[in-house]
Image (cartoon, rainbow, N blue to C red):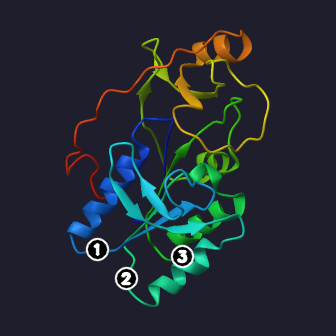
Amino acid sequence: MAKLYFYYSAMNAGKTTVLLQSAHNYRERGMTPLLFTPRMDNRYQVGLIRSRIGLQAEATVFDTDFDLLVHIREALGQHNVHCVLVDEAQFLTREQVYQLTEVVDQLLIPVLCFGLRTDFQGELFPGSRHLLAWADELEELKTICHTGRKATMVVRVDENGYALREGSQVEIGGNERYVSVSRKEFKDVFHGGKRVRFIEPAPAAEPQDDSKPLI
């Protein structure tokens, strides 16, 4: 049966790589996935999902007034849709998460959402809040803090590595702006004024075709 899945993590846990691998798995079997990405994510190119290890795919862009259910219904009128994949799902609105539940419940299409759970202040993103509440399956994708603990949170930092405690919830950036840390390190950096430690990531291995099975 179709389900709504939410794969969440801190930054640099490989969410986008898993999404693109899942899309590849469907296409390799002659099936059609639909990919979505937020318009505001312009780190590489609007409408392009790209992982840190170089995998990429084109996707339909959405903004806050985009109706995902209507778009997917229209796509079904032209071809089969076997899966829906949403990148940066923390930027979904409450209404869009509800639309995705309708894709699952009414259209019987599995939906896989990938995103951050919390913002740089330790607060839930709107999309993540409702995915955590309404998804059928939740799965944490794990990454490591420089302390060796599991990283569960993200801090936004200045050029010197000190946490920025105020600002808009959404500010697009990469490793030069955000660092994944453990809860303890988040408290030390965000509340305690500790300077965060930057680490250059090691080159990632090529993903295997079985890194994420078909749902």
Q: Report how many numbered discs are placed on residues in the image.
A: 3
Q: Residue 106, which numbered label?
A: 3
Of residue 149 and residue 53, the one placed in the foreground of this image is 53
Rendered position, 209 above or below 193:
below
Instruction: Please name the residue that numbered disc 2 is placed on.
Output: 80
Amino acid under disc 2: Asn
Rendered position, 108 above or below 210:
below
Rendered position, 201 above or below 9:
above
Q: Nearer the viewer, mark 1 or mark 3?
A: 1
Judge whether residue 215 can be spotted in this image.
Answer: no
Kindly indicate whether the residue at mark 1 contacts the one at mark 2 (C-beta within 8 angstroms): yes
Where residue 202 appears, as percent x and y from the top left, is 31, 27
Report the residue at 42% width, 13% height from top.
148
Report the residue at 21% width, 70% height from top.
29
Quarter of the picture containing the C terminus is bottom left
What crowding class fits label 2: few (fewer than 14 Cα within 10 Å), some (14-19), or many (20 or more)? few
Rendered position, 46 above or below 18:
below
Report the residue at 59% width, 75% height from top.
69
- Which residue is most to the front? 159
Q: Quadrant of residue 82?
A: bottom left
Amino acid under disc 3: Gln
Please tell me whether mark 1 sits on a helix, a strand or a loop.
loop
Q: Residue 31, which numbered label?
A: 1
Amino acid under disc 1: Met
Judge whether residue 146 can be spotted in this image.
Answer: yes
